Image: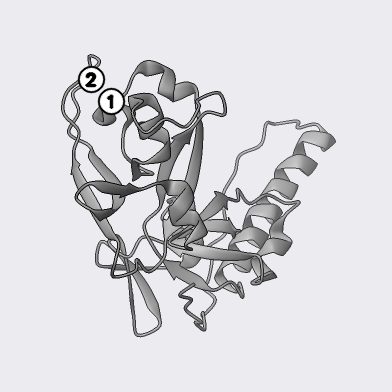
Amino acid sequence: MFKWFLSKKKESKSSEKFECAEEPKPTEKTVSAQNKFDTNKMDWLINDSLLAFMPRELFMHYSDANTAPDPQDPSWQNQGLYFWKEKEAFENKSLPEFFETMDQKLFIINEVPDYISLVSGKAMPWFGMPGGGEKFFFRYDETTPVTLEEAHKLNIINYVEIVELNQDNLSVLNDRDNYCFLIDPYEVKYEDQLFYLNGEKISLAELYQKKKLLVLSVE
């Protein structure tokens, strides 16, 4: 797995403003203060985290345990062979509506061997959907696709889970053996030990708030 080991400078944070009722109950005031503290603490820990950075795009495929493997079944093909960028809108995939109820398995792509190709194409309009989304799959040659199960066994892909930070799990930000930061290299740029979004310098905490920085648990 390709990792970046970076030193990060803590960003200064401006104080937050909030309004209280004329006669707030003590419990309500305590909760507001605690929420403010937790937010500041989270931002500070993100900016000073020890996690490594993984510049990767995030992909997904659908999975339903009730679908039997069958290379001739389009339903299985759209689970066992084809995959999408995680951000691709459902209507762009031209899939039957019941796919929205399936599990969505997230993964990243590692280095692809020379004897395997990564292929993509546009989804045609179907099932009342407009299509147009980019659909991916691996193949050995023009007639032999690589299943996602095979790709996983060959270490071409690694499954991941997105970790939503909260006051109870902030310790993951110092657990670089099991967690990492993911940034999309096509959106976030790193130059001279600084991060940029849309050409503007930005802190890690701000990237996280904008969902441009993800915390991942990697298998």
Dot 2: element = loop
Res. 160 mark: none
Q: For residue 159, say whether it is visible.
A: yes
143 to 193, vertically: above or below: above
Dot 1: element = helix
Residue carrying label 2: 129
Disc 1 marks which amino acid? Answer: Glu
Position in image of residue 125 (x %, y %): 16, 23
Q: Could you say which is closer to the camera, residue 156 or residue 198?
A: 156
Of the 4 image quadrants, the one containing the C terminus is bottom right
Position in image of residue 152 (x %, y %): 49, 55
164 to 108, vertically: above or below: above
Residue carrying label 1: 91
Q: For residue 107, say whether it is visible.
A: no
Q: Residue at x 59, y 62 (%)?
A: 43
First in sequence: mark 2 vs mark 1? 1
Query: In the displayed structure, does residue 36 sit left or right of residue 191?
Result: right
Q: Could you say which is closer to the camera, residue 127 or residue 69?
A: 69
Using the numbered discs, state the Cα–Cα distance from disc 2 to disc 1 in whole angstroms.
5 Å
Query: In the displayed structure, does residue 52 sit left or right of residue 37?
Result: left
Res 178 quadrant in image:
bottom right
Res 203 quadrant in image:
bottom left
Query: In the displayed structure, does residue 15 sit left or right of residue 200?
Result: right
Kindly check if marks 2 and 1 are in contact, taking CB atoms under 8 A apart as contact: yes
Position in image of residue 158 (x %, y %): 50, 58
125 to 57, vertically: above or below: above
Colour basis: one colour
Position in image of residue 86 (x %, y %): 38, 44
Neighbours of disc 2 within 10 Å: few (<14), some (14-19), many (20+): some
Count of marks overlaid on the render: 2
Disc 2 marks which amino acid? Answer: Met
